[in-house]
Each structure stands twice: as structure tokens, then as C-alpha cells.
Amino acid sequence: MAGPEEVFALICKYFIEPVGRTTLFGHIGASLGRVLIGYSIASLAGVTLGLAMGYSKTVRAIAAPLFNIVRPIPAVAWIPMTILWLGIGEAAKIFIIFIGGFANTVINSMSGVRTVDPVLIGAAQLLGASKWQTFRRVILPSSFPYVFAGLQISLSGSWMSVLAAEMVSSHEGVGWLIITGMNNANTAQIMAGMIPIGVVGFILVSLMRWIEKKLCAWNDRSR
Amino acid sequence: MENRIVVKCKNVGKTFIQGKEENEVLKGVNLAIKEEEFVVLFGLAETGKTTLLNLIAGLEPVTEGTIEVNDEIVDGPKPNRGMVYQTTSLFPWLTVLGNVEFGPAVQGIKKTERRKKAQYYIDLVGLSGFEKTYPIKLSGGMKQRVGIARAYCNEPKVILMDEPFGHLDAQTRYLMEEEIERICAKEKRTVIFVTNNIEEAVYLADRILVLSDKPSHIVKEYQIDLPRPRNITAKEFLRLRKEITDFVERSAGEVDG
């Protein structure tokens, strides 16, 4: 097994010299690119479905049972079916990342809508707000802290599922580093994949916190 | 136009049904409130004062009788009624200005016009300089001032105030009562004000309506003709306060204090 100094030296080397097709920067970039695409799709779809489930009893009645069955299935378990449906290209990897982020966004967006204070809804209606205005000006901003918490958790979720995604026949990425490192019994390379996952994950979460603080100055959660 | 009836309740009843339990809160409530009248709905705890206010607001449907505001039967919340709530009901994601101009904004009034209007009411309630502050940074009394400005700025036919000072400390409460007196002297409106505080009722009301125990209806009416602003230690004030207190205690059977 490689010692810490050896791993450190190797990681430094990987930043300059390519491992496989590209350097460590290239691997991190490739993974980040996939995650950002998968995560964006998961966020858009998740927030939309979550808000709809929170707002409409009918949508909730239809979507909730299905959703609750699908939700506990981890991203890795989707790999075989994903390959069958989408092949082994980028689309399959993005789908796995999508699965890693989708559920938390839905759950949080839904509870955001459902925890809106009914007094505020009544107040808006008495001030003359239509149904749509009440949704846009009261329900949406009121659930925003919840939606955002969901987006934060799901960003971590999407990023964490990068390993599962890159198990699907990849040629680069931090997940690829771990998988090929495992196949070649190269512990240093495994570490060179693990550490960036940790560091980049931390940076992403901090970034989200910072954005939340800017956007939710009115809310006590962000103080 | 003077003395036109703005709010009319005809034989209004409200029963809440929870599972198999029926809870009759209001029964046979009749009242008529004139334009620019300041009416206090007085009742002890659990007498359905807030329920009656919610019915007039249209936030809850009546189960019996009819309510008319401005000759229109109430069948839902509408901006010709404004509400000032017991606890803060400000939109926390909007600034003071954003809250006050909410009504005009959703009704499509142009920005320059509604800004001017909002500013007028912000100044009226004494919050000049706090336009850009978020509610979380305001004290309880200041939040209620915003709530009052928000209701006024929408220019409703009738303003409903649901124990707006119930959660304030005694000192702030006195101050806010004086403020309401000052605001109403400057901007005459039809107001229905709910309270369980007799002193507050006598200080503010043109007329006090006393609600009975559940199922509540109006059992007594007091016309208060004392000159304004009223002195809470004046002889006539104290006499009225005692008269109402005695009545309430007698009809309630047992009341502490």
C-alpha cells in the first residue's frame, strides 16, 4: 500500500501528467460537467414536480405512491436498466446523476409548499391577489428556503453519484480514476479520485450556502 | 351618504364540524355597521370574535344567514375588506415597502403611483426610514404598524382588526392604541376591532358590541359618546368601563379579576 506522502506526490503529479486520457484537472472537469448537466435537469424537473405535488392534491395522489416506491432505489441499482435503455454513452451517466439528485429536490419542494402559512395566503387574497398571484407572490417565495435546502442536498447527492455514473463504461472522470485504480490495485490512484470528490463536494456546498445567504436575507435560517 | 350601512350580518351562524364533533361558535348574529364607524367587538376568550371577523372577511364560509359588505353578499375574500391580524402576518420575504404596496401591486396599480401611496401610509404609521427593512428586523409594535399600513394602503371599505395589540407588552399596547386613535382621526375609515380588553374597547370605540358565550351572539350594545382623544382616567371613562365590566362579569357567571 502507498503511504500518505506517496499518494500526495502522485496526486500532484496527476495534475500535470495525464492518467489515462487526461490530467486530474481534466478528470475533475469531465465529472463536473456531467454532474452539472444531470443536476440541472434533476433540479428543474424536481422543483416542478415537487411544487405541483405540494400545491395540488390530485397531482400528489397520483405521483406520491409511485415516487415513494422509486425513491429508496439507490443510483447504483439503476445502472443495468440505464444501460439497457440509454446505452453506455453520456446520456446514461447523466441519467444516473439525475437519479442521485432528483428525489431530495421533489421532497423538499413539496414540503415547502405544504408548510406555507395559510394566514399569509388569506392575507394575500384579501389584498386582492388572484390564484396565480398568490402562487407566484406568496407560495413560491415562502417555500423558497425549503426548495433551496432540497437543491443543496441534491447537489451533494448528484455529485456523490458520479462514481456510480462513471461505472458505466467511462474513459475519464474522478469516478473512472477510482474504478481503474481498483482494477489495477493502484491505491494511490483511488485516493486521487476520492480526495477530489470530497474537496469539490465541499466547495459546491459552500457555494450553495453563500448563494442562499444572498437570496434569503429575510429568513432566519440564513442568519 | 352619511350613516350608510357598510357591513350587515343577518342571522349569521357558524358551526365547525370536526369528524363527529360539532362546534357551534356563532348563532343568530345580527349587526349593522355604518360608514366611518369604529365598532369594537368585545368578548371574552373563546367567544367566536375572531370567527366572526373571518366570516366578514370571507376567509371562512357562513353556515347560516348572510353577510353583506357594501351591499354585496360575502362569498370569499375580496379587497374591499382589509385585515390587521393578531400575530404578524407580514410577508417576511418583502420589505416594509413591499408589504405595504402588496395590495396595489397585485391589483395592477402603476409603480410610481403605488410607491407614492405606500409612502404616505408608511409615514402615517410612523415608519419613515424603515421602507427597506425586512420584517424580521422589526419589533412587535413596528410589525403591527406595517400591518395597519398594508391594510390602509389597499383602501378597503372596511378594516377588520383582530386583537392587533394582544401580543404586545402593556406599554407598547397603550402607545399603539394612541396611534390607532391618531390614524383614525386623520384617515376616517369603517373599522371593526376585536378585543377582550374593556379599557381598549372604551378608549377606541364609537360603539361596543358585546358577544355572549358560545354559541355567541350580540347581547349588549354600548354607544360611546365621550370626546376624543379619550382620557382613560377621566371620571366618565372609568364609569363606563366599570359598567361594562360589571355587565360582562354578571353575564359570564364567573370571571377572574
Image (cartoon, coloured by chain):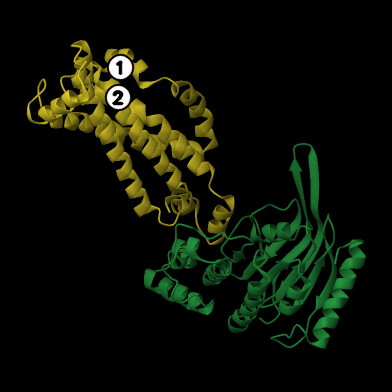
Chain colours: A yellow, B green
Identify the residue position indicated by label 2 in the image: A95
* Rendered residue at 28%/40% (across/down): A203
Query: Are circles 1 and 2 on residues that touch, CB within 8 Å?
Result: yes
Q: SS at mark 1? A: helix
Q: Residues within 10 Å of mark 1 (few under 14, many from 20)?
A: some
Q: Residues within 10 Å of mark 2 (few under 14, many from 20)?
A: many
The amino acid pointed to by label 1 is Thr
* Rendered residue at 31%/25% (across/down): A161
Residue A4 vs B18, above or below: the answer is above
Identify the residue position indicated by label 1 in the image: A82
* Rendered residue at 46%/77% (across/down): B128
Residue B35 vs A176, above or below: the answer is below
Quarter of image, res A137:
bottom left
B16 sits left or right of B178 in the view: right
B151 sits left or right of A109 in the view: right
Q: In which chain is the residue bearing label 2?
A: A
Judging depth in this view, the residue of A68 and B33 nearest the camera is: A68
Q: Position of residue A154 (x, y in %)?
A: 37, 34
Q: CA distance from mark 1 to mark 2?
A: 8 Å
Residue B250 vs B4, above or below: the answer is above
Query: Does residue B236 appear in this view?
Result: yes
Q: Are marks 1 and 2 on the same chain?
A: yes
